[in-house]
Image (spheres, rainbow, N blue to C red):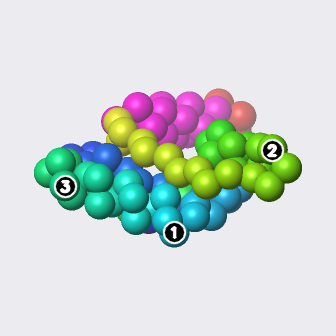
Amino acid sequence: MVTELGKGAGIKIMDSSTICDTRMVEFLKNTADKNKIKWQPEILPAGGTDTAGIQRNGKSGSIAGAISIPTDTSIKSLKWLTKRISRTALTSW
């Protein structure tokens, strides 16, 4: 589940480099609910964050989680990339 604009902060469940500890996920969900903060689950099929590195830190690792703020930057980047690919394809024929 990639996050969507307007549906609240993203609470990371997993991405390609980490699976968040359920205790951290529950803590973040409960904290958001208690403070009336809209949230949505974040499951990224590709990419990752520093969460994986934090989990592996130290001798026994650590509990880690992440909160993301959805933006339209990735949507704009995707539109730009699509246009760029289309132009490149047209000019290479």
**On the image, numbered disc 3 is attached to which residue?**
34
Q: Nearer the viewer, residue 32 or 59?
A: 59
- Type of amino acid at the residue the image marks with label 1: Thr
Can residue 77 be seen in this snapshot? yes
The question of residue 77 being in magenta is answered with: yes
Left or right of residue 15, residue 30 in this image: left
- Type of amino acid at the residue the image marks with label 3: Lys
Q: Is residue 93 above or below residue 24?
A: above
User: Which quadrant of the view contains residue 18?
Assistant: bottom right
Residue 92, labelled with which disc?
Answer: none
User: N-terminal of the two: label 2 or label 1?
Assistant: 1
The residues colored magenta run: 72-90
Can residue 3 be seen in this snapshot? no
Q: Predominant secondary structure in magenta?
A: helix
**On the image, numbered disc 1 is attached to which residue?**
22
Residue at the limit of the structure toward the front, as seen here: 59
- Type of amino acid at the residue the image marks with label 2: Gly
User: Dot 2, how many residues are within 10 Å of its Cα: few (below 14), some (14-19), or many (20+)?
Assistant: few
Residue at the limit of the structure toward the bottom, as seen here: 22
Residue at the limit of the structure toward the left, as seen here: 36
Q: Secondary structure at mark 1?
A: helix
Tell me residue 35's x, y (percent): 18, 48
